[in-house]
Image: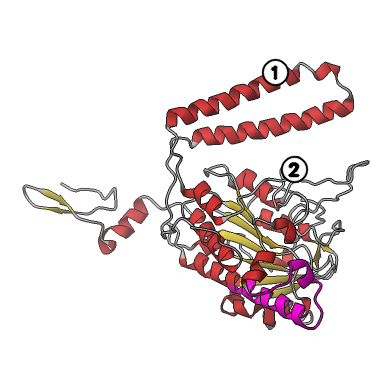
């Protein structure tokens, strides 16, 4: 009698007994792989942003040395071990940005603040939320927004968010490692029946609101009708979130393969960013979400390094202490970014690849330095979009829309979208 291998277990057989063996790599792996090939790792997108720009004299590579033979400048030396796996791009600009201290408000949207006549502020959907509509369908959290406290001192502008929904409204984030940890990994102590009742109550309120609002349609002006349509869209988004919450209600949250302890006490600055990176790795390990943004601190970051000035004053650097703090900030941010890449490469997926192979990761700021709203600092890494890394790219047009990059990354991850923000094309050089 023959026993087909249908699981990772192999067997020893005598005339009277069948004894199951533990999984043995040399006996079962290849046969199992042929019988039930593992699914490819899912695509993931991560957007990291910080305010106040960089030290332009020591962060950007020489603009005349492009391709693979460029030299990493002082501010990016910490990425030397990953040089073949990163892409640095120059001459990307958010053409509608006109506020130097709004570093994240329009960073991922590329919207024109004055697009609506008679209004002084308008925004549109951010690239991460476009990605989340496709990549977030199968995960507990469609997307995760990470932020920082005291963000008004870190060059992050109105909304204090990198993520903006379809209506151009900011999406609140988790502003401490403690909040992020509990959102991702802590199960509620509230009994399942009570949580189900709470969801039902939320739904009944939404049903009543929609019914009452719908009866008003014939009594409203066009302006009010437009406002009501926008309101309905917001309600529909809430309904979608409730449906997903209901779907995952009785599914325990997974714990990461690398143990991560619950954060304790107040953690700020350098250690805060490092811990947020660890939490992001853990979130990817358990596939809690496939789209994340992280709006990083600056003021608390430089204070944790011993600085006594604010991020704003640092950004207006001249020769002396301000310049020294700005350069130190660049070097320490780069050090942590390299650490994040280390963790991505070391963390293995079920199919034997690494998290690094499946992620598309962007890192940068909406401002060059001081009040220069051009040449947005931009670094890409990760294998998710199939980018040909290891190069320094300089766009021919010094006003190439930053949204050309977001559009390129979205399409590179298989997301069907023809335009984003103020894009006027894609960056084909990423794959040539």
Q: Earlier in the sequence, mark 2 or mark 1?
A: 2
Q: Position of residue 368 (x, y in %)?
A: 79, 69
Q: Position of residue 188 (x, y in %)?
A: 46, 40
> Is residue 120 toward the left or the right of residue 407 in the image?
right
> Is residue 72 toward the left or the right of residue 419 in the image?
left
Q: Residue at x 60, y 36 (%)?
A: 241
Q: Residues within 10 Å of mark 2 (few under 14, many from 20)?
A: some
Check if mark 2's residue and mark 1's residue have beta carbons within 8 Å.
no
Q: Residues within 10 Å of mark 1 (few under 14, many from 20)?
A: few
User: Dot 2: what SS?
Assistant: loop
Is the magenta region chiefly helix, strand or loop?
helix
Q: Which mark is residue 169?
A: 2
Location of residue 172 with respect to 322 vertically, above or below: above
Q: Residue at x 58, y 33 (%)?
A: 242
Q: Which mark is residue 239?
A: none
Q: Position of residue 73 (x, y in %)?
A: 69, 82
Residue closer to the observer: 183 or 348: 183
Location of residue 255 with respect to 73 vertically, above or below: above
User: Dot 1: what SS?
Assistant: helix
> Is residue 124 toward the left or the right of residue 297 in the image?
right
Q: Which residues are magenta?
A: 306-335
Residue 120 is one of the magenta-drawn residues: no
Residue 389 visible to an observer of this rendering = no
As drawn, which residue projects farthest toward the front?
A: 308
Residue 43 visible to an observer of this rendering = yes
How much space separates mark 2 and mark 1, taking CA atoms? Answer: 24 Å
Residue wearing tag 1: 211
């Amino acid at each position: 009698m023959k026993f087909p291998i249908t699981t990772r277990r192999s067997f020893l057989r005598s005339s009277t007994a069948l004894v199951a063996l533990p999984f043995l790599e040399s006996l079962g792996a290849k046969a199992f792989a042929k019988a039930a090939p593992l699914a490819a790792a899912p695509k993931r997108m991560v957007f990291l942003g910080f305010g106040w720009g960089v030290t332009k004299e020591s962060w950007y590579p020489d603009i005349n040395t492009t391709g693979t033979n460029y030299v990493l400048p002082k501010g990016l030396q910490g990425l030397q071990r990953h040089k073949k796996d990163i892409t640095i791009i120059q001459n990307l600009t958010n053409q509608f940005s006109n506020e130097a201290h709004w570093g994240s408000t329009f960073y991922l949207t590329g919207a024109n603040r004055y697009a609506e006549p008679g209004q002084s502020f308008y925004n549109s959907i951010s690239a991460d939320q476009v990605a989340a509509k496709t990549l977030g369908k199968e995960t507990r959290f469609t997307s995760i927004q990470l932020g920082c406290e005291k963000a008004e001192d870190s060059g992050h502008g109105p909304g204090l968010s990198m993520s903006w929904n379809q209506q151009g409204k900011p999406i609140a984030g988790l502003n401490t490692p403690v909040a992020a940890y509990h959102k991702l990994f802590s199960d509620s102590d509230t009994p399942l029946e009570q949580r189900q009742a709470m969801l039902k109550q939320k739904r009944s309120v939404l049903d009543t609101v929609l019914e009452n609002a719908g009866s008003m349609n014939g009594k409203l002006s066009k302006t009010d009708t437009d406002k009501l349509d926008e309101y309905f869209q917001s309600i529909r988004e809430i309904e979608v979130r409730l449906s997903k919450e209901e779907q995952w209600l009785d599914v325990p949250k997974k714990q990461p393969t690398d143990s991560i302890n619950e954060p304790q006490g107040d953690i700020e600055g350098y250690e805060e960013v490092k811990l947020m990176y660890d939490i992001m790795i853990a979130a990817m390990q358990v596939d809690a979400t496939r789209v994340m943004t992280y709006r990083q601190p600056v003021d608390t970051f430089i204070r944790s390094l011993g600085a006594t000035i604010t991020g704003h004053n640092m950004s207006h650097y001249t020769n002396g202490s301000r310049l020294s703090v700005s350069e130190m900030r660049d070097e320490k941010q780069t050090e942590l970014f390299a650490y994040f890449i280390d963790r991505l490469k070391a963390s293995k997926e079920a199919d034997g690849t690494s998290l690094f192979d499946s992620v598309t990761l962007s890192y940068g700021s909406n401002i060059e330095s001081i009040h220069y709203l051009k040449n947005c600092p931009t670094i890409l890494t990760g294998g998710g979009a199939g980018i040909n890394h290891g190069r320094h790219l300089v766009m021919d047009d010094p006003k190439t829309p930053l949204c050309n990059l977001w559009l390129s990354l979205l399409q590179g991850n298989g997301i069907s979208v023809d335009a984003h923000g103020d894009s006027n094309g894609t960056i084909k050089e990423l794959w040539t």
